[in-house]
Image: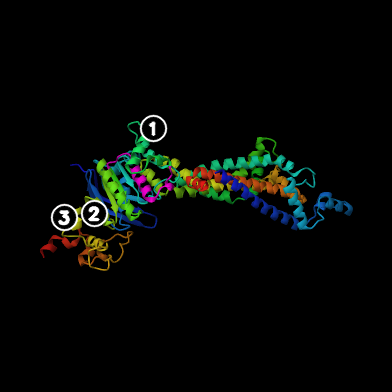
């Protein structure tokens, strides 16, 4: 098992290197000079040249890439933000707790709601409840989250004054953004859980359990649910990654000072080191979550576990 | 002597929005204590539907039982509620399913799957460790070392999995065992092993059995009585001797015997039964076998045949009607 974990951790290195190359290239290809954006339109040429020389922006693309990689490998130095001149990871780690809180809360609620309603929907297949849940889930899965966020602000903040429309100062400020993120993730999970459950309750071993004299309820909770959860766990992991990305949009809509806002502003400034480090950080986090998902998988399914052990 | 199981004129239909499938059309048979009945017939004849009807495990949404009674120890199972059926399933009647590869829960140890049956019918109030002892005992009985009870189904071969399935079915020492093609998914050498073991265990426990199969060889080794099923009807019914060597036979039974290879016969080719079973979504007038029957006559298409009986042997065919014999 440890061998497998070490192998998986080592495998994230090429993944992160690939992400680094792609983002670095895209950032270099997009128009706009960081010096102009940060120093302002009125800055004179001498100041701009000085800025470019200071940050090594006057070098060619391969040279800049080489220098960037060299700093990371030799000193683990990801650079300083052009605008604030602080080490990038200090900035990222300062903002990350808010984003992490958003993503974790929304995944927690979407998992609870999505899995419970998915099971109910599958068990009561073809009932009115099932039809209602399926249609509602489809509607919520297709609503874009930024629009839903704006509608929630309109309804609950501007009209009803129940929750704040922006910021991250109290628990109330998390309600609307978490709701926005959780609703679409829950809708997806509901559909996933429902179809996995429907597939599982038609399996032969379910009939074996019924033939033993188990009640329909026992069969669903002891035999069907655990088997049906296998694909759901994977999609839960993926939606954790998606909600980290979705937080970028949601933080903008709700003006929450999280990692998402940091990235959006850094991209606007073409704050090279900050963008690179933030995205690498998110990618690494995503790899970690997927590793955890695979380990949970092995924990649930003995067939996978024995494959890892060999 | 009272019958352990008596199925009377059982009909099962599957109803969907589009069509009705007439799966079982008036089947009657009886089983006495310790007896084995073979249900023989080709795929789709309604054999599995009959066994699921006995256990009341048919799909609630589509299956209907418009007619018939299933008496088990004098009680009509069709009148019992779900709770009462749960007490019977696994304890008094249990079932072995066709495919051992899919009949076991892949993420539960086999020990737990056997223990579940014992726990569900734990009238003596056995403690957990006593149940574990019983699991060991049952595993030994089917020839699996008890140490392997902490293993998962994927760690067992097909034949071993079927032993586990049999262990689950026999754990509570049921009075009636329904075995739905228990050896079809296994290779031939393992088939013989499993059959022999089932026969031994049944004798040991005094269990009656319904053996569903399309393999006449298996029937001849294991069964006391045989019912040949065609398109949801019993076309021939009798003791093993009646059906295997009696004087009169239903043309379908003759066809079934013609389609198994024999080492001694001189013929080079097997004789398959031409044609297919009638469409089960259509109600049939006359004999259901008429379209494939080499002896078909005008009356066969008009009237459903009645039963011709000679002692314990019954054949449902116009060929043996009284007036035909006198003519």
Name the residue located 66 percent from the left edge and 51 percent from the top edge.
A16
Q: Are marks 3 and 2 on the same chain?
A: yes
Whether residue B187 is in magenta: the answer is no
Q: Using the rendered image of the protein, determine whether residue B2 is visible from the camera's viewpoint.
A: yes
Whether residue B158 is in magenta: the answer is yes
Please state the chain letter of the residue tagged with numbered disc 2 in the rendered image: B
Disc 1 packing (10 Å; few <14; some 14–19; many ≥20)? few
Residue at the disc numbered 2 = B220
In the rendered image, the quadrant that contains the C terminus of chain B is bottom left
Q: Would you place residue B174 above or below residue B127 in this image?
A: below
SS state under label 1:
helix
Q: CA gap, disc 3 to disc 2?
A: 22 Å
Q: CA gap, disc 1 to disc 2?
A: 41 Å
Between A246 and A145, the one lying in front of the other is: A246
Instruction: Measuring from the top left, give residue A111's x and y in whole percent.
Output: 55, 42
Residue at the disc numbered 3 = B309
SS state under label 3:
strand
Please state the chain letter of the residue tagged with numbered disc 1 in the rendered image: B
Closer mark to the observer between disc 3 and disc 2: 2
Q: Which numbered tag is attached to residue B129?
A: 1
In the rendered structure, the answer to whether residue A155 lies left or right of residue B302 reads right
Q: Which residues are magenta?
A: B151-175
The answer to whether mark 1 and mark 2 are in CB contact below 8 A is no
């Amino acid at each position: 098992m440890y061998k497998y974990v070490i192998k998986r951790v080592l495998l994230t290195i090429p993944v992160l290197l690939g992400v680094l190359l792609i983002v670095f290239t895209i950032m270099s290809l997009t128009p706009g000079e960081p010096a102009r954006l940060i120093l302002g339109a009125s800055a004179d040429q001498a100041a701009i040249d000085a800025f470019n020389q200071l940050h090594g922006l006057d070098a060619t693309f391969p040279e800049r890439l080489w220098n960037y990689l060299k700093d990371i490998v030799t000193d683990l130095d990801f650079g300083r933000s052009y605008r604030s001149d602080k080490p990038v990871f200090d900035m990222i780690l300062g903002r990350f707790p808010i984003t992490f809180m958003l993503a974790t809360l929304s995944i927690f609620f979407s998992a609870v709601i999505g899995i419970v309603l998915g099971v109910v929907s599958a068990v009561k297949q073809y009932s009115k409840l099932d039809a209602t849940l399926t249609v509602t889930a489809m509607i919520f899965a297709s609503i874009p989250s930024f629009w839903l966020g704006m509608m929630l602000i309109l309804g609950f903040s501007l009209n009803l004054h129940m929750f704040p429309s922006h910021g991250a100062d109290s628990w109330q400020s998390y309600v609307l953004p978490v709701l926005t993120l959780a609703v679409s993730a829950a809708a997806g999970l509901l559909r996933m859980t429902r179809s996995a459950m429907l597939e599982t309750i038609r399996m032969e071993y379910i009939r074996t359990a019924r033939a033993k004299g188990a009640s329909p309820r026992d069969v669903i909770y002891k035999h069907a649910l655990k088997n049906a959860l296998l694909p759901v766990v994977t999609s839960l992991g993926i939606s954790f990654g998606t909600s980290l990305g979705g937080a970028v949009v949601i933080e903008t809509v709700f003006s929450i000072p999280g990692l998402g806002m940091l990235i959006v502003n850094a991209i606007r400034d073409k704050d090279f080191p900050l963008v690179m480090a933030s995205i690498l950080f998110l990618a690494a986090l995503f790899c970690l979550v997927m590793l955890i998902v695979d380990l949970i998988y092995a924990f649930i399914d003995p067939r996978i576990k024995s494959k890892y052990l060999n | 002597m009272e019958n352990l199981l008596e199925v009377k004129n059982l009909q099962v239909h599957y109803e969907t929005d589009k069509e009705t499938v007439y799966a079982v059309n008036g089947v009657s048979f009886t089983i006495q204590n310790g007896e084995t009945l073979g249900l023989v017939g080709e795929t789709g004849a309604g054999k599995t539907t009959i066994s699921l009807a006995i256990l009341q495990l048919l799909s609630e949404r589509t299956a209907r039982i418009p007619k018939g009674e299933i008496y088990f120890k004098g009680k009509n199972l069709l009148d019992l509620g779900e709770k009462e059926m749960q007490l019977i399933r696994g304890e008094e009647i249990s079932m072995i399913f066709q495919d051992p590869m899919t009949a076991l829960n892949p993420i539960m140890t086999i020990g737990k799957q056997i223990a579940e049956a014992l726990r569900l019918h734990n009238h003596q109030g056995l403690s957990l460790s006593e149940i574990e002892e019983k699991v060991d005992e049952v595993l030994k009985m089917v020839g699996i070392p008890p140490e392997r009870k902490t293993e998962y189904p994927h760690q067992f071969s097909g034949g071993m999995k079927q032993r586990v399935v049999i262990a689950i079915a026999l754990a509570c020492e049921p009075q009636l065992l329904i075995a739905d093609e228990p050896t079809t998914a296994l290779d031939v050498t393992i088939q013989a092993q499993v059959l022999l073991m089932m026969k031994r265990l049944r004798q040991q426990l005094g269990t009656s059995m319904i053996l569903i199969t399309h393999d006449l060889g298996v029937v001849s080794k294991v069964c006391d009585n045989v019912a040949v099923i065609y398109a949801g009807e019993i076309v021939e019914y009798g003791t093993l001797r009646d059906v295997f060597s009696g004087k009169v036979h239903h043309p379908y039974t003759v066809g079934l015997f013609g389609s198994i290879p024999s080492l001694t016969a001189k013929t080079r080719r097997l004789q398959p039964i031409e044609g297919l079973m009638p469409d089960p979504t259509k109600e049939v007038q006359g004999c259901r076998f008429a379209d494939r029957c080499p002896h078909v006559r005008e009356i066969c298409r008009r009237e459903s045949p009645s039963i011709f009986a000679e002692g314990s042997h019954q054949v449902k065919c116009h060929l043996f009607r009284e007036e035909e014999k006198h003519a």
